[in-house]
Amino acid sequence: MTALELRGVNLHEVLAEPGSWTTVYTDGPQGEPPGAVESRMRSLKDRLGEAGVPDDDAEAVLAALPKDIGLPAPSTRWLLVREGEVVADEGFAAARRGPERVTHGAFPEIAPLLRHRGTERRILVVETGRDGAELTFERLGRAAPEQVEQIEGEGHPITKVSPGGWSQARFQRSVEEVWQHTQSDVADAVDRIVRERRPEHVFVTGDAQARGLLLENIEDGTLDLVVEVDADTRADGADDSALLQAIDETVSAAHDDVITATRDRAAEQDARNGASGLTAVVGALQQAQVDTLLLDERMLDDEETLLALPAAPWVALAAEDTFEAGPGTPLPAAEALVRAAMLTDAAVLFIEDEPAEGEPRSSSDTAPPLAVLRWPEASITGDAQPQADASDETTR
């Protein structure tokens, strides 16, 4: 799946031309009883009507949501509907990020989708032991792993004992050789998956001695990605709380690092490498100058609007700013910025400030939009600069 595709739907094409789109961002399965699900669907039906959603679109949404698509609880669904047909149905194995959203208009509402996509880190979990290992590659937030591979050891002997007599040392060496050979096979499989799948993190858990042998055998490039978790998740009765905590902390820290690096890039060359604030960012987007767009997720709740244009430059502050691409369609500012970023192949990142359940939202001001530029700001009026390659693999 490319950055602009949703299971065969080309999002670039959807965003480029005005149409008649219904977008629903709502809860998936929440582990509630059937009666509660029916009540939730009745409530959603009312909100669909309030949003001006056509009857055939509303019927398609209400028919699609109760279907089991393999999501755990809690989970989230994002549906894109046109003329009574569900064009895209994305499910995420995580709770909603922000309020439920139901809209009908010329363009889909995609910011909630991109927020979830931005957290879909590719990880490889290696649960290793003396008798083999299980390797699981997944994208966080997806319902099921993309690849699960079992590595079987050579079999007996796998446990050291003390038989006594002259054979004891030979027996112990034989056991250690079996362990070593098993972890060498596991290491080969881990290195192969890293080369093929490009995970951002490799979490290694399991038997302590097996972990040590594995880390001695894997390649240096793989070792740079490893987070070792001091827990044996393969043991009978073991839980995975330590592993889940390590994943959460590592991914959160990595996201913070990306945000910091983005801000640092924008500040380079005395801030000429960036654009800050709504007016400056819109101007940069109009020139396809934005490499990475950084938005505070609280901006999704703002009431300010921009004009979404049916052709380049895709976004405008006002009617006099449309460069004959109008007439424009008023959209929430965050949605208009995200759409223009997607249509000019810019990466989109969100500063997450979603409070924990039961905690108040931060009272600090919403950060202004920020853009890292493909060429320095001064070059707009100076020497022409070639645009950077827009094939950045960052989440778009």
Image (cartoon, rainbow, N blue to C red):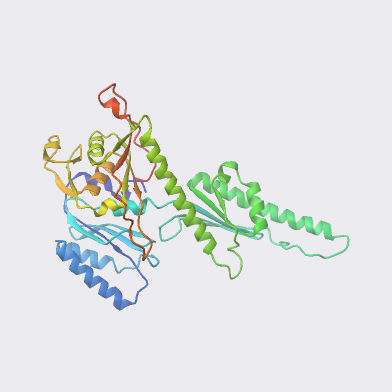
Q: Nearer the viewer, residue 305 or 244?
A: 305
Residue 14 shows up from this direction: no
Residue 280 appears left or right of 145? left
- Residue 142 or 186: which is nearer the viewer? 142
| Residue 27 in picture, x, y percent from top left | 31, 65
Residue reaching furthest to the front: 363
Residue occupying the point 26% across, 72% down: 40
**Percent of width and height locating residue 233:** 58, 63
- Image coords of residue 334 (percent x, y): 25, 48
In this rendering, position of residue 189 left or right of residue 173:
left
Q: Residue at x 25, y 71 (%)?
A: 41
Q: Quadrant of residue 222?
A: top right
Q: Locate residue 197 relative to residue 265 in the image: left or right.
A: right
Residue at (39% x, 52% y) in the render: 119
The residue positioned farthest toward the right in the image shown: 166
Q: Residue at x 53, y 51 (%)?
A: 202
> Could one spot residue 89 in this view of the protein?
yes
Q: Quadrant of the C terminus?
A: top left
The foreground one among 164 and 349 is: 349
Residue 58 place in picture, x, y as percent: 19, 64
Please give the count of numbered marks on the rendered protein.
0
Quadrant of residue 169 within the rendered picture: bottom right
| In this rendering, position of residue 380 left or right of residue 253 | left
